Image: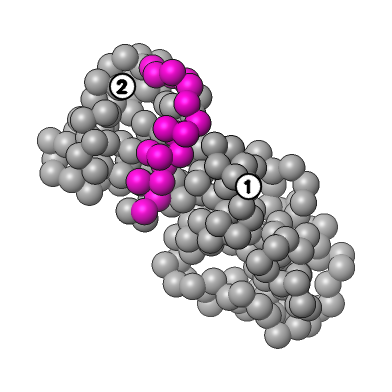
Amino acid sequence: MKKHLFAIALACACSLPLGAAAGFVEGANAYNAKNYALALKEVLPLATAGHADAQHLLGVMHYVGRGVARDFKLALQWHRKAAQQGKADAQYVVGAMYYTGNAVPKDQMQALQWFRKAAEKGHADAQHTLGLMYCYRMPGVRHDVVIAYMLYNLSAANGNKHALAQRSAITRRMTQEQIDEAQSLSRTWKPGTPLPTKSLTGGDSA
């Protein structure tokens, strides 16, 4: 599979009481303003208390070394805590760290599981990455051009800038029947529901 660079995105879905949520917004704003000391002051207590967005942001800070020492193992720990609470951005990062072997032994099956969790929440980069895995016959998935096309389609609709080019490239290897099935799967799938793991017309054994 071609090298895929992943972006760490921040979201502000607030699941704790207003005061805690406000503290996270202040921390996120401080981080974006490059006031990393203030960001850490606001975010660390929330992350310790179980706030998924704060855990994810603290993971980002450890990953890039802003406001704290760069530490991939701590980054993974905080991202995993947020991922286990269902935060799609964190699930994607955990998947990427398993895929690249960053702070953990490389494990494509673990990567696949976390990418799928994020993709099923509508995470564009996870959908794109999962599409690449189906396209390039990675461990744990069937080679399936229809599922790959579907995932590129969803990813493009959710804003991934690379998915359109990937979809265009794979289209040249597909029959009209396969394209029609992929389009139908794209139209009928809803975020929060399982993604199909195989198609009727586009797959073969992994």
x, y (%) of residue 14? 25, 45
Q: Residue at x 50, y 46 (%)?
A: 94
Question: Is residue 146 a member of the stretch shown in magenta?
Answer: no
Q: Amino acid at mark 1?
A: Lys
Image quadrant where residue 32 sits:
top left
Q: Are marks 2 and 1 in contact (CB under 8 Å)?
A: no
Q: Residue at x 84, y 77 (%)?
A: 175
Question: In the image as oriented, which residue stretches furthest toward the bottom?
Answer: 200
- Label annotation for residue 39: 2
Q: Is residue 123 visible?
A: yes
Q: Is residue 107 left or right of residue 66?
A: right
Give the magenta-colored segment's residue range: 65-84
Image quadrant where residue 167 sits:
bottom right
Secondary structure under tag 1 reads loop
Coloration mode: one colour
Q: Is residue 88 left or right of residue 101?
A: left
For disc 1, the marked residue is 106
Q: Residue at x 31, y 21 (%)?
A: 39
Q: Is residue 164 left or right of residue 19?
A: right
Q: Is residue 21 visible?
A: no
x, y (%) of residue 157? 58, 57
Characterize the local packing of mark 1: few (<14), some (14-19) or many (20 or more) Cα atoms within 10 angstroms.
some
**Magenta span main SS:** helix
Foreground residue among 204 and 201: 204
Secondary structure under tag 2 reads helix
